[in-house]
Amino acid sequence: MAATTSRTLELLSLLQSHRHWTAHELVDRLGVSERTLRRDVERLRELGYGIESLRGVAGGYRLEAGTGLPPLLLSDDEGVAIAVGLRSQATAGLRGAEHTTLSALAKIEQVLPPALRRRIEALQSHAAAGAPPLGGRDGRPVPAVDPELLGLLALACRDAERLRFRYTDANGGETARAVEPYRLVPIARRWYLLAWDRDRDDWRTFRVDRVDDVFQTRVRFEPRPIGDEEARERVERATRYRRSSVTARVVVAMPLAELAAHLGWWGRELEAVDADHCAWPIEADSVEGLAMGLMWLPPSAEYRIEGEELRAFLAVQSARFAAAAG
């Protein structure tokens, strides 16, 4: 009976994660016969799940749309991601939906195991506010970060627990680090860990996707006084030095508030020039990266560039583009 129940739940999880499965695919995934698969489908139907059977060569099964919301099967990481998102939205205040946000959060958190609730609480309390590490405007892929690792680091920050791990720097060199972790800070496309490096007796910033083989020492430390704002400033200074070698200033013929609304987080360093103009400092690891940033300005906005390297690059490229366009 236990094996049958486990297999039926696995079938439900597969149906929820994919729009359509052929019978052959499900038989291979579950390691059962087609007859057993049909029985498991009937069990789910008896529980109220609308499952549509499709005939023919590409026939199979899929959950019917519009038949109501059945109970969802979530993995640990999915549960954590949803709960963190709901907590963030509840904090920000979703206009007109505060009650539904909080009720959904309560329903999810009450069924999460204690270990996962601890991970959520740690991520909420020890990840500095800021833009999420989603795709960058330069089109480069997002570095993969293991959610389990992110949760572990957040717990260590919250519990003031010393960690040891292996770290790979930008040049590919590996070092062993012993640190006192303080904050997880998202900057642009990446997560960073701000920690006190015990061997170097100073603050250090670590890209989380380069952290590996974390060892929890179970040894506590007395935290130094540092808040979210100072943590973010330290990480921004460290990452700006590492990632940027070319800068420019763009003066745009738009009021600051209007351009800030258009650029969002990417316009966080806008400066007002006058009521109708603002300045946008930009930086990148190449002049090509700076030129890409200009594409995110509103098409109707007039602007001028202060920065000789970018101006020279655009002068050459404009001639090439004109020639290419005939």
Image (cartoon, helix red, strand yellow):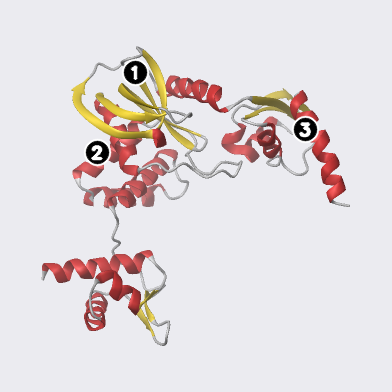
**Mark 1 vs mark 3: which is more N-terminal?**
1
Q: Is residue 184 left or right of residue 306?
A: left
**Where is residue 272 shown, x and y percent of the image?**
69, 24
Find residue 118 and name its label: 2
Residue at 75 percent across and 44 percent down: it is: 299
The 10 Å Cα crowd at callout 2, few under 14, some 14 to 19, many 20 or more, is some
* Residue 164 visible: yes
Cα–Cα span, label 3 and label 2: 51 Å
**Where is residue 262 shown, x and y percent of the image?**
65, 40
Element type at mark 1: strand
Verify CB contact (< 8 Å) between mark 3 and mark 2. no
Residue at numbered disc 1: 197
**Mark 3 vs mark 2: which is more N-terminal?**
2
Q: Give the residue type at disc 1.
A: Asp
Q: Is residue 283 above or below residue 264?
A: above
- Which of discs 3 and 2 lies nearer the camera? The answer is 3
Residue at 30 percent across and 56 percent down: it is: 74
Q: Is residue 66 above or below residue 266?
A: below
The 10 Å Cα crowd at callout 1, few under 14, some 14 to 19, many 20 or more, is some
Q: Is residue 298 above or below residue 15?
A: above
Q: Is residue 203 above or below residue 266?
A: above
Cα–Cα span, label 2 and label 1: 25 Å
Q: Is residue 215 left or right of residue 313?
A: left
Residue at numbered disc 3: 313
Q: Quadrant of residue 5?
A: bottom left
- Which of discs 2 and 1 lies nearer the camera? The answer is 1
Verify CB contact (< 8 Å) between mark 1 and mark 3. no
Q: Is residue 312 left or right of residue 176?
A: right
Which quarter of the rendering shows the N terminus? bottom left
